[in-house]
């Protein structure tokens, strides 16, 4: 047998063996991919156009839904979802920062409670299981204790509407000097003590303070929705953290550990992204964005 023929047989054998093994590898990867549905927070979507055009782009990029913003045109949102088949993963309150339930101004608090109720009504119309609420801010003269008492009082006013609509209020962890530690979040939910109030965990918001997976360990099944957000503690040329400007898998989140902890508590809901709009500005960037999220969900 000449050299050329030997090389041909050896190489062909390797290719055939690889082909036989490939389905097994692909099956393992497919099995590893968590069956969570993917969505994008509406006001972070960089793709231009109407509500329908944006929804079409989300669908084409491999997303299953959106996190609507409250106080949108309900009819337009519903029509776009019906045409594209997208679902509503959550509704994010539009006014909880400007009209916080912790405000010392009673009029502003009242407006904040009404905005919260409208967010619940929006979610009911869209078929979303929960809404996202930033409950208050403990700064600018508002103490932690005042934020605690006022926000709980405001949330309790909305609980009858939660029961009526079947929609939960999910509190989000943010940089508001309030409920900044997982145990504080757990204590807050226990103080409210309602099946209609749970947690919307933002994975990227607290990596600057400590491992995000610690929140999952403490809150467990109280987490009913997730924001997938990347954050980098790495310093740039000016000595500042790169922060939220990095892409998925290029930040400081410990994704395998986070995903493992979510598996332990049995999370099986939505993976909602909240990343800078420049990462979803056109069809090509949206597909890359979706692919990076897939890699996280398979980690």
Image (cartoon, helix red, strand yellow):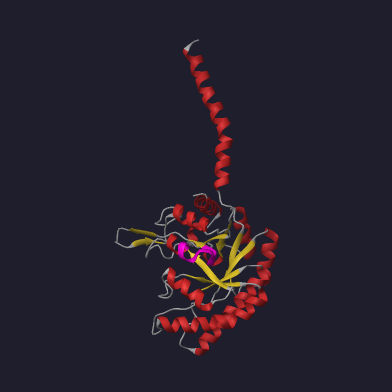
Above or below for 260 versus 73: above
- 78 lies left or right of 264: right
Where is residue 78 drawn, in percent x and y? 68, 67
Residue at image x 55%, y 47%?
A: 32
- 104 lies left or right of 284: left
Instruction: Report whether residue 279 is seen.
Output: yes
Q: Nearer the viewer, residue 215 or 12?
A: 215
Q: Nearer the viewer, residue 48 or 176?
A: 176
Above or below for 7 versus 34: above
Instruction: Report whether residue 134 is seen.
Output: no
Q: What range of the chain is rendered magenta?
A: 216-226
How many discs appear?
0
Q: Is residue 220 magenta?
A: yes
Where is residue 284 drawn, in percent x and y? 54, 51
Q: Is residue 192 magenta?
A: no
Residue at image x 58%, y 83%?
A: 157
- Res. 18 image quadrant: top right
Above or below for 33 versus 119: above
Dominant SS in magenta = helix
- Res. 130 image quadrant: bottom right
Where is residue 216 drawn, in percent x and y? 47, 62
Instruction: Identify the residue at the far top of this view.
Output: 1
Q: Nearer the viewer, residue 263 or 66?
A: 263
Where is residue 122 drawn, in percent x and y? 63, 73
């Amino acid at each position: 047998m000449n050299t050329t023929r030997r090389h041909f047989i050896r190489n062909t054998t390797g290719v055939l063996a690889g082909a036989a093994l490939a389905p097994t590898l692909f099956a393992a990867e497919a099995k590893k991919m968590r069956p969570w549905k993917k969505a994008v927070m509406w006001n972070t979507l960089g793709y231009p156009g109407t509500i329908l055009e944006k929804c079409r782009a989300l669908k084409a990029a491999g997303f299953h839904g959106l996190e609507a913003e409250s106080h949108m045109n309900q009819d337009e949102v519903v029509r776009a979802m019906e045409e594209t088949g997208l679902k509503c993963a959550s509704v994010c309150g539009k006014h909880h920062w400007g009209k916080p339930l912790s405000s010392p101004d009673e009029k502003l608090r009242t407006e904040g409670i009404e905005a919260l109720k409208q967010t619940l009504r929006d979610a009911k119309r869209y078929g979303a299981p929960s809404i996202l609420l930033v409950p208050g801010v403990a700064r600018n003269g508002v103490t932690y204790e005042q934020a605690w008492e006022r926000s709980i009082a405001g949330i309790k006013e909305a609980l009858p509407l939660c029961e009526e609509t079947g929609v939960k209020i999910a509190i989000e962890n943010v940089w508001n000097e309030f409920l900044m530690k997982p145990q504080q979040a757990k204590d807050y939910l226990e103080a409210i003590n309602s099946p209609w109030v749970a947690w919307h965990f933002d994975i990227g918001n607290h990596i600057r303070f400590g491992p995000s997976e610690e929140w999952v360990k403490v809150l467990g099944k109280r987490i009913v929705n997730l924001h997938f957000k990347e954050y980098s503690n790495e310093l740039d040329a000016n000595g500042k953290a790169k922060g939220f400007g990095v892409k998925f898998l290029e930040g400081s989140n410990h994704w395998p550990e986070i995903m493992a902890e979510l598996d332990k508590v049995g999370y099986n809901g939505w993976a909602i992204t909240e990343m800078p709009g420049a990462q979803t500005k056109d069809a090509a960037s949206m597909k890359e964005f979706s692919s990076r999220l897939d890699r996280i969900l398979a980690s």
